[in-house]
Image (cartoon, grey):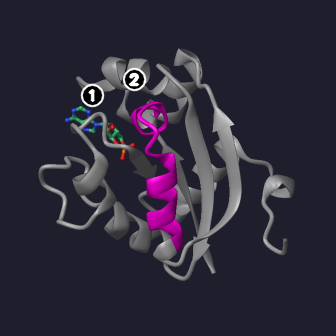
Amino acid sequence: MERTLAILKPDCVSANKMGRVLDRIENAGFKIIGMKMVRLNAATAGKFYEVHKERPFYQDLVQFMSSDRCVALVLEKDNAVADFRKLIGATDPAEAEPGTIRREFATSKQNNIVHGSDSPENARIEIGFFFSERELVENA
Ligand code: CMP
C-alpha cells in the first residue's frame, strides 16, 4: 500500500466543498488514514511550499494558503500518489481532464481546491509535515 498527502485548500473549505471532494476521494478507493483541520500561518505555508520560493506566484500562494482553514489528509491505496494526481487533474483547472476534481470544483491555477504529493518520496516528507506516525489510523 502506498500513501500520499492531500490538502483540501482554503477555497475548498470556505466554499463548503469539503463533503463533495471527500466523497470523490472515497469513491475513488482511497482510504483516509489521517485527517486534520489546520489554519496555517504564513510562515508554515511558506515552509510547506518552500520548493516554489523563487517562483513569481509564491507570495500569493502563501497568502492564499494561510487565508482560511485547510484539511490535511493522509490517503492510502495501491499507487496512491499517481492515482490521486490523476483524480485531481492538472494544476490549472482549465487544463484538467473532464471529470477530475479540479476541473469540477477549482476556480483558478492558484485556487485549485486540493493539493496532492507529486512523488512517494515527497509524500513521506509532506505527511511528516502534518502528522506523526501515531496519528495515522490504519486499523480502526
Ligand atoms: P499545488 O499542486 O498545491 O502545488 C503548488 C501550488 O502552487 C499549486 O497547487 C497552485 O495552487 C499554485 N500554483 C502553481 N503554479 C501556479 C501559477 N502559475 N500561478 C499561480 N499559482 C500557481
Determine the CA span between mark 1 and mark 2.
15 Å
Furthest toward the left, the residue is 94
Per the image, label 1 sits on a secondary structure element best described as: loop
> What amino acid type should be assigned to the residue bearing mark 2?
Phe
Per the image, label 2 sits on a secondary structure element best described as: helix
Which residue is located at x 60 percent, y 45 percent?
A: 72
- Give left or right: position of 34 versus 23: right
Q: Nearer the viewer, residue 76 or 47?
A: 76
Label 1 within 8 A of ligand 1 by Cβ: yes
- Give left or right: position of 3 versus 6: right
Q: Which mark is residue 64?
A: 2
Can you say which quadrant of the picture contains the N terminus?
bottom right
Query: Could you classify mark 2 by the number of other residues whose Cα lies within 10 Å: few (under 14), some (14-19), or many (20 or more)?
Result: some
Numbered range of the magenta stretch: 10-26
Please say if 16 is above or below 139: above
Dot placed on the residue nearer the N-terminal end, 1 or 2: 1
Query: CB of mark 1 within 8 Å of CB of mark 2?
Result: no
Q: Quadrant of ligand 1?
A: top left
| 35 magenta-colored | no
For mark 1, what is the residue? 55
Q: Nearer the viewer, residue 26 or 39?
A: 26
Please say if 21 is above or below 7: below
| 21 magenta-colored | yes
Which residue is located at x 49 percent, y 44 percent?
A: 8
Give the image location of residue 13, x and y in percent.
Answer: 49, 36
